Amino acid sequence: MKPYVICHMMPSVDGRLRTDRWDVPEIGHDEYERTADSYRADAWICGRKTMEEFAGGRSVRSHRREKIPRDDYVVARKRRGARYAIALDPEGKLHWNDNEIDGDPIIEVLGEDVSNSFLAFLREKGISYVFAGRKGAELNLSRVLEKLASRFGIRKLMLEGGGETNGAFLHQGLVDELSLLLTPVADGGIGEPTLFDVEHGRSRKAAAKLRLKSVRRAASDMLWIKYAVRKHGISTSSSKLRP
């Protein structure tokens, strides 16, 4: 059984995601956190590029001879009720300074071809990890969700980008609800990441159809729009995520 997945994002009116380009007031960012917290999710998940802002940078790997078994590694949660912070880091490139993000224990999602030195680094830091494919270039996101539910008891998951990660989940039919805090900005940037960037080539049909649940006016001229996903993605195969 997979968790209920809510994709919660703060896009511009034209679907771009780079909030650092928009001069959003602090009240707008606070509204994003408030609306996200209203879901009371057990965990939040982001791709490697998005998670780099929380980590210290890319990992510095040392040579390690010992072979570490490719078994999931679960660290007991320190604080009851804490949410998990989940990083899709297929090739093991994130260098963490701590095993938590603002008190949320970190879980790394990896490919089995990740280096032994990176696994040793995670173990030394006390960071949980799960495997979701033989190669880091391809992750089976359905398997990821199953493991998050069975290993960590996650029932409700907040998906928070970036565009490629959102697109991969949508393409595999794994998004249940879309929560948009629409920001009153027209970005217009060519080549900027968008809400859903699907890496499987052009399709004759849209990746999903939506049903409107609610629309509310939010702080700073924002709109909070909720959609249920009516028609899931076109594929249940593994998705390629850029390293």
Image (spheres, rainbow, N blue to C red):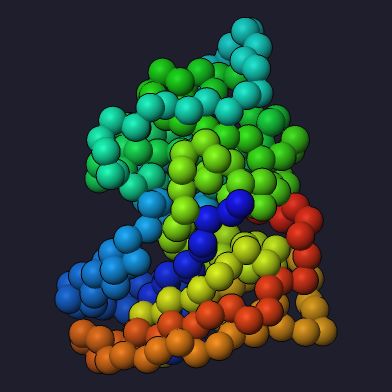
Residue 58 visible, this angle = no
The residue most toward the top is 66
Q: Position of residue 191 (x, y in %)?
A: 58, 75
Q: Residue at x 25, y 86 (%)?
A: 218
Q: Residue at x 47, y 67 (%)?
A: 6
Q: Residue at x 77, y 84 (%)?
A: 205
Near-viewer residue (120 or 83): 83
Q: Residue at x 46, y 57 (%)?
A: 157
Q: Position of residue 5 (x, y in %)?
A: 51, 63
Q: Is residue 172 above or below residue 75?
A: below
- Left or right: 150 with respect to 171? left
Near-viewer residue (98 or 170): 170
Residue 225 visible, this angle = yes
Q: Is residue 222 above or below residue 237?
A: below
The residue most toward the front is 1
Q: Position of residue 215 (x, y in %)?
A: 37, 91
The residue most toward the right is 204
Q: Is residue 20 above or below residue 134?
A: below
Near-viewer residue (26 or 6): 6
- Left or right: 83 with respect to 155? left
- Left or right: 212 with respect to 234? left
Q: Is residue 8 above or below residue 54?
A: below
* Quadrant position of residue 198: bottom right
* Quadrant position of residue 126: top left
